[in-house]
Every structure is written in C-alpha cells, then in structure tokens.
C-alpha cells in the first residue's frame, strides 16, 4: 500500500472519510456508496472508529475491504482512548499484518458520559505522545488533525497551534483539518502554522451542509461556525431539498476558491454518502 505523503508530491488528491456502520443495512448502504465514490479514484479513504475504540475490529475489516475490493489505500484512525502501550503494540501488529501504512493519530473524545479526558493506564494524554510512540515502533505515515478555528477545548487558536506543532515535531507527516466554512479561517491558520515552522502538507476538510439538523450537530460538536453568507443562504430555503442544494453550492464555491489558492487536495467528510461529494468533485 502507498504512503499518502507520496501521493501529495505527485498530484492533487481528493480523499474521503467514512465510519463503520452499526447495522448490516448500514454496511450494505456504505458499500453501495463506495462503489460510486471509487469512480473518483480517491488517493485514500480514512476509516474512523467509535468512542473508546468500540469499532476497532470493524475499522480494520473495512480498511482491508477498501483495498482488496477497490484498490484504495486506507488511512485508519487510532486514538489514545482506552489503550495502553501494550494494547497499542498489539493493534499495530494487526495493522502491519494487513500491510496498511497510514494512521491518523488522535487524542480522541472522552467516552460517552464523561466530560474530561482521562488517559488509560500506561497510555497517553495527548496526540503528540501517541505520534511519538507510533513513530518509535514503525515507519508509518502518520496524519494528525488540525483545527482552523481552534479545538473546542483550547483556550485560543495560538495555544492550539502550539499543540499542533508538538504533534508535527513528534513525527506527524500530514495534517487533515477539521471542517470549516469560512476560507479566511483556513488562510489565517496556514499563516499561523507557517510562522510556527510547520511545513508538512495541510489538507482542508470539507463537509457540505445537507440538512438542517446537521448544522446544529456541527456547531455543537466541534465548534465550527456558520458564516453569515452561508447562514443567509440557508435561511432562504423552505425545504430540506433546498437546504441540501444551497449547502452543496456553497461548498462548491468554497472548494473552487481553495483550489485556486493552491491547496494540495480536499478531504471530504462524507457521512457515508456519495451524492453531495460527487456533485462537488464533478463541478471542479
């Protein structure tokens, strides 16, 4: 399998994020959607897992299937939640046996019902510690998360970029950003990371608004703001279909501007659906 950093050296790359479904019906739907998305020939597809590592095995099953069925390289998520060093080593052996070369290292959210993150015994409190550990035991390509508007738990953006610098210094090869809707936030983020000496590729994360409920979940979950231009468009919509169309059109404009600015690719948060992402990519 290919290291994703090699892909960005060669070409503009579209990539996707998916999550393991909870039901057989959801899994059948996922593979139907993947049949469509595979036509785009994405550089890679990242596969999440549930809180506390609850779907780790399913994550690896899907990652392997992506490669065997479509020839697509997976990027598997791995968090600090619920895993000490010995458990991490065991999981890494599984990944190595599947010849997977790409890992997204995250601290992870506290388990459901908890408001603060408590590291497991013999585990890690921060993503940079996980990155350093992974780097010490294998030559993986390691991606990390970046937050153009700052992580929801950080006191300010400068502090958050300081944490990002620690992850890069620990060995991260690439940064995939959280979704955002104001490109100026991304441009400012790039300027600030450059001043910190961060030189690895930074790939913008894109999630088109496709439903009214999604807006509340987005802003509540990760703190991403809805800029006035997007809010005004959505307020003029009378139906869910109109909201979906307006959200996709906004993301198309957002991506066109980012591409002309010079980004190396897009990382689309698909919610296991293909239609919105396909419309955006086809428009580009």
Image (spheres, grey):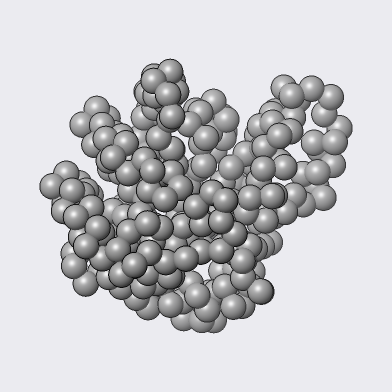
Return the x and y of residue 5 as percentages of the image width and height. 31, 58
Q: Is residue 140 left or right of residue 195?
A: left
Q: Is residue 99 shown above or below 223?
A: above
The residue shown at (63%, 50%) is 221
The answer to whether residue 121 is seen in the rendering is yes
Residue 61 sits in quarter: top left
Q: Is residue 30 left or right of residue 260?
A: left
Can you say which quadrant of the picture contains the C terminus? top right
Q: Nearer the viewer, residue 190 or 165?
A: 165
The answer to whether residue 199 is seen in the rendering is no
Q: Is residue 195 shown above or below 103?
A: below
Q: Nearer the viewer, residue 101 or 251?
A: 101
Return the x and y of residue 37 as percentages of the image width and height. 42, 29
The residue shown at (48%, 72%) is 164
The residue shown at (46%, 76%) is 165
Residue 149 sits in quarter: bottom right
Return the x and y of residue 49 as percentages of the image width and height. 40, 44
The residue shown at (42%, 66%) is 119
Q: Nearer the viewer, residue 200 or 76?
A: 76
Residue 225 sits in quarter: bottom right
């Amino acid at each position: 399998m290919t290291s994703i950093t090699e892909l960005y050296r060669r070409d503009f790359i579209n990539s996707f994020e998916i999550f393991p479904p909870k039901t057989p019906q959801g899994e059948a739907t996922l593979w139907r959607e993947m049949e469509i998305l595979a036509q785009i020939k994405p550089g890679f597809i990242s596969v999440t897992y549930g809180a506390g590592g609850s779907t780790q095995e399913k994550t690896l099953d899907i990652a392997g299937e992506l490669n065997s069925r479509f020839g697509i390289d997976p990027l598997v998520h791995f968090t600090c939640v619920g895993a000490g060093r010995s458990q991490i080593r065991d999981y890494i052996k599984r990944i190595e046996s599947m010849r997977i070369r790409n890992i997204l290292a995250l601290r992870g959210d506290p388990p459901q019902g908890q408001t603060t993150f408590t590291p497991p015994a013999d585990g890690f409190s921060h993503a940079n510690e996980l990155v350093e550990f992974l780097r010490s035991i294998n030559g993986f390509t390691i991606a990390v998360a970046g937050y153009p508007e700052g992580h929801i738990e950080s006191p300010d953006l400068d502090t958050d970029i300081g944490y990002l610098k620690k992850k890069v210094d620990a060995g991260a090869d690439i940064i995939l950003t959280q979704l955002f809707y104001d490109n100026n936030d991304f441009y400012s983020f790039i300027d600030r990371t450059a001043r910190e000496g961060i030189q690895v590729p930074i790939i913008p994360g894109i999630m088109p608004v496709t439903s009214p409920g999604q807006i509340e979940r987005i802003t509540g979950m990760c703190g991403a703001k809805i800029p006035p231009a997007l809010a005004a468009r959505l307020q003029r919509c009378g139906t869910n279909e109109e909201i979906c169309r307006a959200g996709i059109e906004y993301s198309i404009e957002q991506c066109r501007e980012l591409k002309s600015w010079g980004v190396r690719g897009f990382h689309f948060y698909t919610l296991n659906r293909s239609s919105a992402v396909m419309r955006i990519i086809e428009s580009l």
